[in-house]
Image (cartoon, grey):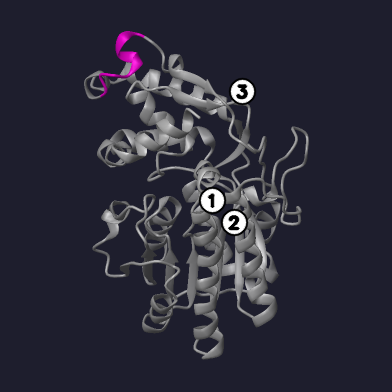
Amino acid sequence: MTETAKNSEHKPCNLLVTGGAGFIGSNFVHYWLKTWPDTRLIVLDALTYAGNRNNLTEVEDNKSLRFVQGDILDETLVEGLLRDEAIDTIVHFAAESHVDRSIHGPDAFLQTNIIGTHSLLKAAKRVWLDDQIKDNHRFHHVSTDEVYGTLKPNDPAFTETTPYAPNSPYAASKASSDFLVRAYHETYGLNVTTSNCSNNYGSYQFPEKLIPLVIANILDGKPLPIYGDGQQIRDWLYVDDHNRGIDLVIRHGRNNETYNIGGNNEWANIDIVKLICELLDKQFQSASDMAIRFPNAPQVTGKSAKDLITFVKDRAGHDRRYAIDASKITGELGYSPKESFETGIRKTLQWYLENETWWRAIMDGSYQHWLKTNYNK
C-alpha cells in the first residue's frame, strides 16, 4: 500500500449498505460482519425481484446488523437513517443490473440507478455537509466496467481513464450515476469513491445471470441459451474478491478517485458454459445421489450437459469484450484476487448444489415465464 493511501485512511463505524439483500450486497454484508465485527451495518433494500431477505438468513441474528425494507428513492427514510444511526459510510450497491431487462424495460433502470443514486446523494449532502454532522464521511459507489463500452480482441484493458461509451440502457444509467457521484464531490465537497468491477460470480447470484442460470438449467435438463456465437469475452471476478477490493477502497482509497476491480481472468461465454458442463458431468459420475436429486439432468440418461447448449439470436447492442486493468488498485492499495477462476467456479458450483431450495424458490413461477418470453425473441 502506498504512502498516499495510508494518509487517506477512512475508518467506518456505522455503514448504510443499499441493496444489501441482493447478490453482491449480501455477500458484502457477510464479508464485512466477519472481517470487521466491531462495526455496525444498516442494510436498506426494497426487496424487489433480485433482493432476497433469505440471503441474510445466516447473519440476521447478528446484533451488529439491522435490516430496513425501503427504497433509496425515499429521501426522508434515508435521511432519517443517516441521522438516527450516525452513519458515516454509505456503500451503494442498489441498482437494476440485468442488461436484458434494461433492453426490454429501460425506465426502471433510469429511475433506480440515476434518480435513486441522486436521492441518496441529496440525503447525504443534507446530513453530512449542510448540517455538518459527519466530517469523517464517505459515499462509496459501486459501478460496472460496462460504462466503458466494448473492446476489440487486441485492445488494451479498461483503465480508470478509459472514456465512457455505454452501449445498453443499463450501462448508460450506471454511467450517469457515476457522473452524479463525481459532481457531488466537485460541486459540494462530498467525500466519495467509486469502483468499477468486472463480471461477478458466486453464491446468492440471481439465476438470470449466466453462471447460475447454466447450473440450474443443466440440473433440470433445460436448454442452455447462448447468445450469438458465444464468443463474448468477460473478465470474471469472484464476489468475495470484489468485496475485499471494495473494503480497501472504502478504508484507504483516495477521495474522489475511481478504482477498477477485476479478476485478471478473461473467458469467452461459451467456454465458461462448457466448463460448467464438464464439472457437472464429473459430479454426476462421482456422486451417486445426483441422479436421484436431479432426475431430469441429461447425465441421468448417459448424455453430457453440453447436449443442452442452444445458440439463440444475439441480443441488441451486445458488447463483445470487457477486460479490466486493475493495476491502480493493486499498486495503491495492494489488491489482488485470491481466487482463480478454477477455484472460484468450484466453490460456486458447490454452493448451488448445497442450496437447491434457495434457487428453486426463485426459478419457479413468473421468472421462468420471463426467461421463456425474452430468450425466444
- Horizontal and vertical percent position of residue 103: 55, 43
Q: Which residue is mark 2?
A: 173
Q: Element at badge 1? A: loop
Dot 3 or dot 1, earlier in sequence: 1
Amino acid at pointer 1: Pro
Q: Is residue 110 magenta?
A: no
User: How many discs appear?
Assistant: 3
- Which residue sits at x=49%, y=73%? 89
- Which residue sits at x=37%, y=50%? 49
Q: Which residue is mark 1?
A: 106
Q: Which disc is residue 229 wearing?
A: 3
Asked if labels 1 and 3 touch by Cβ distance under 8 angstroms, the answer is no
Q: Quadrant of residue 315?
A: top right
Marks 2 and 3 sit apart, C-alpha to C-alpha, by 27 Å
Given this view, does label 2 or label 3 mark the residue nearer the observer? 2
Q: Is residue 129 above or below residue 32?
A: below
- Magenta highlight range: 294-302
